[in-house]
Amino acid sequence: MVTPSPSVPRLVIAAPSSGSGKTTVATGLMAALAARGLAVSPHKVGPDYIDPGYHALATGRVGRNLDAYLCGPELIAPLFLHGARGCDIAVVEGVMGLYDGAAGEGELASTAQVAKLLRAPVVLVVDASSQSRSVAALVHGFVSWDPEVRVGGVILNKVASDRHEALLREALDSVGVPVLGAVRRAGQVAVPSRHLGLVPVAERRAAAVDAVAAMAARVEAGCDLEGLVALARGAGALPGAAWDAAGALASSSPPPLPVPASGGSASHAPGRPRTPPGSSHGEASPDGPVVAVAGGAAFTFSYAEHAELLAAAGAEVVVFDPLRDERLPDGVRGLVIGGGFPEVYAAELSANEPLRKAVAALAGSGAPVAAECAGLLYLCRELDGLPLCGVLDASARMSERLTLGYRDAVAVTDGALAAAGTRMRGHEFHRTVVEPGAGAAPAWGIRAPERRVEGFVQHGVHASYLHTHWASAPGVARRFVEGCRTS
């Protein structure tokens, strides 16, 4: 018998399509509810790293992702309950249109699927500009498309006037879905974008604080907060238990230890790599190896569960900033460099020569290094002609072409993260090209949507464009930490 978890009031903020205003409404609602003293748990459907940064700013809690493609549908409710533990209410921002999911995979990874898995009511944010009575047909279609999706209310966005609002409300009376807000077209919140979406909070924190406050003011002025909270409270309990990093590691199969890959070397002397003195990051824990995780404005893409899994596997996780820190943390035994925007900060990253040399020395010692996308670029010889760490015999450059989409992958080479044959799902999102695209010992074989090899495994380095969510395969964190212990 499955015991229901304590009820967490929850809403999913969705839209008919991208650009309807769901990020503004979701983030503004989170901030408005937090301002009323509620502990708000923020979530984002899909692989997006940027919106959760604004959610965290709005709520004071870590923004978490719910991605049924990367993690599997079975982990959506446990990951949600983990993030929402101890909160008064949860707000989940959807992705794209309500029913849009992974290409060719039906409803998989769609907002609609996540809403069903969470048994959560949906609030549909509709761009009402340039329409009046037609809004009823639009909403009726979304309400009736999948009877298992409960659309509990509508928020009208970009409403021109009182008269326009009255026409829209009158039209929606026939649909039977309550209007829980009408947000005026005037005073749109300006959140700057560039080649990969919104500019992350870490790059514009003061301006981002103002933007979130403006979003909250718009939602407060135009939405029925009491009605939204009442809808959330009707969600009921979810069966099952919350995800837990230690429990996930305990229930996963112990991975085999990393072995040197072709192109690597097993001749490095064992023991802790020597790091420069004077680091301000603190001493290594006597109970586990220090794993340094890149942060700061250039490396803002990470899933909270990664650090939690590393810590549960016994590591002391320490964040460092490649833009500012000239040394790696004291006693570092492993390095995780996630995604971000090194192309925006290439000059500054290149100018920090002491850290580039320290990273190259650590990688050359055979210590485990996991690098995704931005991390891959940082380990290359150069990016657009600017010298970087030179760990990989590859060069990177900006491209006009956007590479975007989910990937089904299998590890080709035994490496710091995964044994050969390990299957994982990932996501690519970049406007850069690395040449060559794979080393003599590739990291991944991409199975779908096209078959190719990608990435690099050498010494302890595992570098790739592929973003993965370790909650789907927690053994990779244990493998990485065990590699840090023995390198």
Image (cartoon, helix red, strand yellow):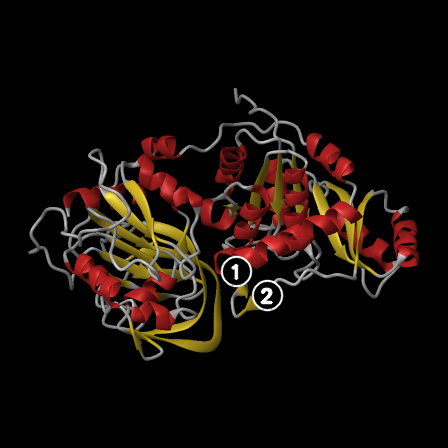
If you read the primary sequence from the N terminus, does the residue marked by circle 2 or circle 1 appear first?
2
Q: Is residue 271 left or right of residue 471?
A: left
Q: Establish if 428 lies above or below 47.
A: below
Instruction: Tell me which residue sits at (42%, 32%) in the image.
Output: 244
Residue 464 image-quadrant placement: bottom left
Q: Secondary structure at mark 2?
A: loop
Q: Position of residue 432 (x, y in %)?
A: 41, 72
Q: CA distance from mark 2 to mark 1?
A: 10 Å
Q: Which residue is mark 1?
A: 204
| Residue 294 location, quadrant | bottom left
Identity, as a three-letter code, of the amino acid under mark 2: Pro
Q: Is disc 1 surrounded by few (<14), some (14 to 19) or many (20+) residues within 10 Å?
A: few
Return the residue nearer the eye: 368 or 247: 368
Image position of 194 (left or right of 335):
right
Secondary element at tag 1 = loop
Residue 235, given in percent of the width and then of the height, sits at 67, 32
Q: Residue at x 62, y 50 (%)?
A: 94
Residue beneath label 2, please? 192
Q: Nearer the viewer, residue 366 or 325?
A: 325
Instruction: Please tell me which residue is depicted at 53% across the width and 63% down the height of the picture.
Output: 199
Q: Amino acid at mark 1?
A: Arg
Please state the horizontal and vertical placement of residue 239, each as a whole percent of the image. Answer: 56, 27
Label 2 close to label 1 by CB (< 8 Å): yes
In this view, the residue in front, 236 or 452, is 236
> Which is more foreground, mark 2 or mark 1?
1
Q: Against 72, is 468 above or below?
A: below
